[in-house]
Image (cartoon, helix red, strand yellow):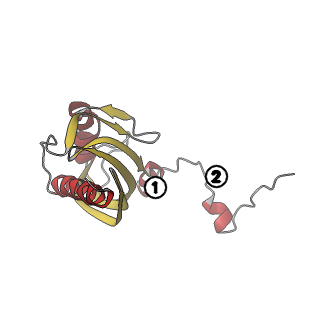
Amino acid sequence: MSHDAQTAASLAAVKRMEAGLAAGEMDMTPYFTEDFVWRGNQGCGTKNGIADFQRNWQFPIRAAFTDRHYKTEKFMADGDWAACFGHIEATHSGTFMGIAPTGKRIKIPYMDFWRIEDGRIADNPVSVDFASVMAQLGVDVFNGHGWENYDNGSAKPAKPD
């Protein structure tokens, strides 16, 4: 397969998977290899295989956040890799990281990267902005020391000597 054809196939594979997630599908086997690895940033963990992914990521996210709408801003692909960034709009209707349901409508920002093997996802490094999610739910994980304070002028950034 040519590089351009592989790029197109990779992009098509992840768009099928995203459509399945958005539709609330429960069977992820059409989209992921049996031994795929989902690698999240701090707070998200690592999931080895479909059962681990569903038990320790997909189902808890669905339990905590309902009425989900996936808003992908941009897809990119190159060969056997594809990526996107965007957010999920959802209602906080179940416990999330110890926070009881608030009923708030929030955004869950994310960046996803996928390596495709034989039309299915084999490797999935992910970055989910849980600090933003927590802030929307009333928890400042930076305890008032976020660098946004430099941007708004309420704190002065340090300079190297």
In the depicted structure, whether residue 11 falls above or below residue 152: above
Gap between marks 1 and 2 measured at Cα: 14 Å
Q: Which residue is mark 2?
A: 145
| Residue at image point 46% right, 55% down | 132
Horizontal relation, residue 159 to residue 35: left or right: right
Which residue type does callout 2 highlight? Answer: His
Mark 2 neighbour density, 10 Å: few (under 14) some (14–19) many (20 or more):
few
The residue under label 1 is: 132
Q: Residue at x 20, y 52 (%)?
A: 17
The part of the image, by quadrant, that contains residue 108 is: bottom left
x%, y% of residue 131?
A: 48, 50
Left or right of 21 in this view: 102: right
- Which type of secondary structure does the marked residue at label 1 adopt? helix
Residue type of the residue flagged with mark 1: Ser
Residue 111 at x, y = what percent?
A: 40, 54
Q: Residue at position x 37%, y 34% from top?
A: 46
Instruction: In the displayed orientation, state which residue is furthest to the right.
Output: 161
Q: Which mark is residue 119?
A: none
Q: Is residue 103 visible?
A: no
Nearest to the observer: residue 87 or residue 154: 87
